[in-house]
Amino acid sequence: MSTNKQIAKIIKTCREQSGLTQLGITKKLGSNNRSSYMKYETGQTMPSVSKFESILKALGFHLTLLVSKKKLTKDQVAAIDFVVKSDVKQKSPEES
């Protein structure tokens, strides 16, 4: 499974466990346009680390707790690691 699909699965699973609809989480994130959020949940778009953390926080989850409680598969942990490393590489030296 691709990294995007792994992250998408994490986001969707957390949303479903939180009991929110796609529109509900979109509003909680401060938007009324659920199409952007849906791209994360379907794997069409990879969220930045900060966006991924914001989504998880809005759903009542924290990235380190997900990993530490071993609720994720090895592939999902690898996908998160990929997102973090990609995000760090994309930042300019001024942002670090």
Image (tube, helix red, strand yellow):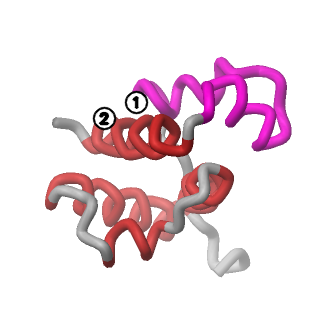
Mark 2, residue position: 5
Q: Is residue 39 magenta?
A: yes
Secondary structure beneath disc 2? helix
Q: Secondary structure at mark 1?
A: loop
What's the residue type where badge 2 is placed?
A: Lys
> Which residues fall within the magenta stretch?
20-45
33 with respect to 93 (left or right): right
| Residue 33 rendering spot, x and y as whole percentages | 77, 21
Q: Quadrant of residue 27?
A: top right
Q: Are marks 1 and 2 in contact (CB under 8 Å)?
A: yes
Residue positioned 65% across, 18% down in the render: 35
Q: Amino acid at mark 1?
A: Gly
Question: In this view of the protein, which residue sits in the foreground, 48 or 70?
Answer: 70
What residue would you read off at disc 1? 43
Name the dominant secondary structure of the magenta segment.
helix
In the image shown, does 51 or 24 lie closer to the viewer?
Answer: 24
Q: Residue at x 39, y 40 (%)?
A: 13
What residue sits 34% from the left and 38% below the top?
9
